[in-house]
Image: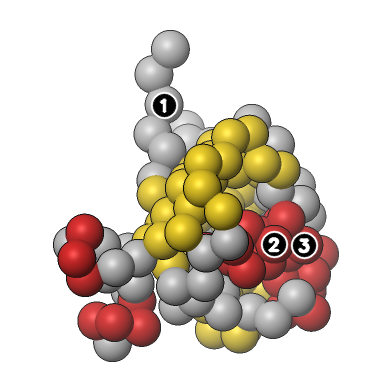
Amino acid sequence: MTSIQPELWVERAGQAVAFYADAFGARVLHQAGQGDDIVAQLAVGEAAFWVAAAGPDSGRFSPGAIGGATSRTLLVADDPDAVVRRAVDSGATEKSAVCDEHGWRLGRIVDPFGHEWEIGKPIGPWPPP
């Protein structure tokens, strides 16, 4: 099996797990530690990612510690409009409203921990012919 599973470094890791469950319907596959000193593997559908406590002693810097994020994560969803609404209702900030662009239905948010997400789905066959 081959997959890519990003790990998001956050302050308040326990709260981040709760946010991703509420905002994206993520479920916890594995968790080690307690409270905010955790490493957790989450899944949205079949897409897995990790959440871990940030800390300068470990060389793990949250977006807040560096003044911005270093990447954006794309969450492919059947209903991007609903997922963006749910994320905003759960505490995310809308960066750009859901619209059609580049052959996708896309919206962008920043979660309460500073990570940027693009939520969308292809409008037609992907990749295009």
Amino acid type, residue under disc 3 in the picture: Asp
Mark 2 = which residue?
Answer: 18
Q: Residue at x 39, y 49 (%)?
A: 7
Q: What is the distance, in whole Å, between disc 2 and disc 3 at their CAs? A: 6 Å
| Relative to 22, 44 lies left or right | left
Q: Quadrant of residue 66?
A: bottom left
Q: Disc 3 on helix, strand or loop? A: helix
Disc 3 to disc 1: CB gap under 8 Å: no
Amino acid type, residue under disc 2 in the picture: Ala
Q: Quadrant of the N terminus?
A: top left
Mark 3 = which residue?
Answer: 22
Q: Quadrant of residue 111?
A: bottom right
Q: Residue at x 76, y 52 (%)?
A: 25
Q: Residue at x 61, y 85 (%)?
A: 93
Q: Position of residue 39 (x, y in %)?
A: 47, 47
Q: Is residue 62 visible?
A: yes
Q: Quadrant of residue 96?
A: bottom right
| Relative to 82, 93 lies left or right | left
Mark 1 = which residue?
Answer: 3
